[in-house]
Amino acid sequence: MQEIEFYFDWDNNKIIFNNGISCTINEEKNSFIYRGIEFTLEADVEKDLCNIFNEQYINVTEY
């Protein structure tokens, strides 16, 4: 299973993945679109990504 790291760039309203994909966060919906599928930030993003794409996603955002 491929492991993909990502982090939240809150200053620019983006989520950056180490596979070269970056997604803009929709502040009104509190969501983002990754590979054609909308994800809400209120959910368990890592778990949802893993279940849909069968890859391991790791949030490396420093809070």
Image: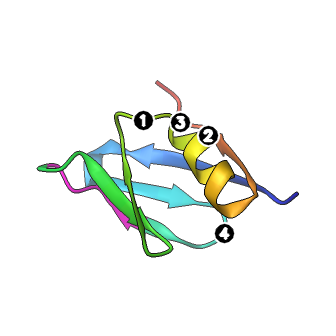
Q: Residue 19 — which label?
A: 4
Q: Which of 8 and 31 is in front in this view?
A: 31
Dot 4 and dot 3 residues touching (CB under 8 Å) = no
- Residue 11 position, x and y percent, is 27, 46
Q: Report the amino acid beneath label 2.
A: Lys
Q: Report the amino acid beneath label 3.
A: Thr
Judged from the image, the secondary structure of the residue bearing numbered disc 2 is helix
Which class describes the residues within 10 Å of circle 2: few (<14), some (14-19), or many (20+)? some
> Residue at (34%, 58%) from the top-left corner?
32
Of marks 3 and 2, which one's residue comes earlier in the chain?
2
Q: Estimate the spatial distance between the alpha carbons at disc 1 and disc 2, rounded to whole Å.
A: 9 Å
Q: Looking at the image, is 61 positioned above or below residue 9?
A: above
In this view, the residue farthest toward the front is: 51
Of labels 4 and 2, the one closer to you: 2
Q: Is the magenta stretch mostly helix, strand or loop?
A: loop
Of labels 1 and 3, the one closer to you: 1
Q: Estimate the spatial distance between the alpha carbons at disc 3 and disc 2, rounded to whole Å.
A: 16 Å
Dot 1 and dot 2 residues touching (CB under 8 Å) = yes
Of marks 4 and 2, which one's residue comes earlier in the chain?
4
Judged from the image, the secondary structure of the residue bearing numbered disc 4 is loop
Of labels 4 and 1, the one closer to you: 1
- Residue 7 position, x and y percent, is 52, 46
Q: Quadrant of the N terminus?
A: bottom right
Q: Mark 1 points at which residue?
A: 43
Which class describes the residues within 10 Å of circle 4: few (<14), some (14-19), or many (20+)? few
Q: Report the amino acid beneath label 1.
A: Ala
Q: Name the residue under label 3.
A: 61
Q: Name the residue under label 2.
A: 47
Q: Estimate the spatial distance between the alpha carbons at disc 4 and disc 2, rounded to whole Å.
A: 18 Å
Q: Give the range drawn in magenta.
A: 23-27
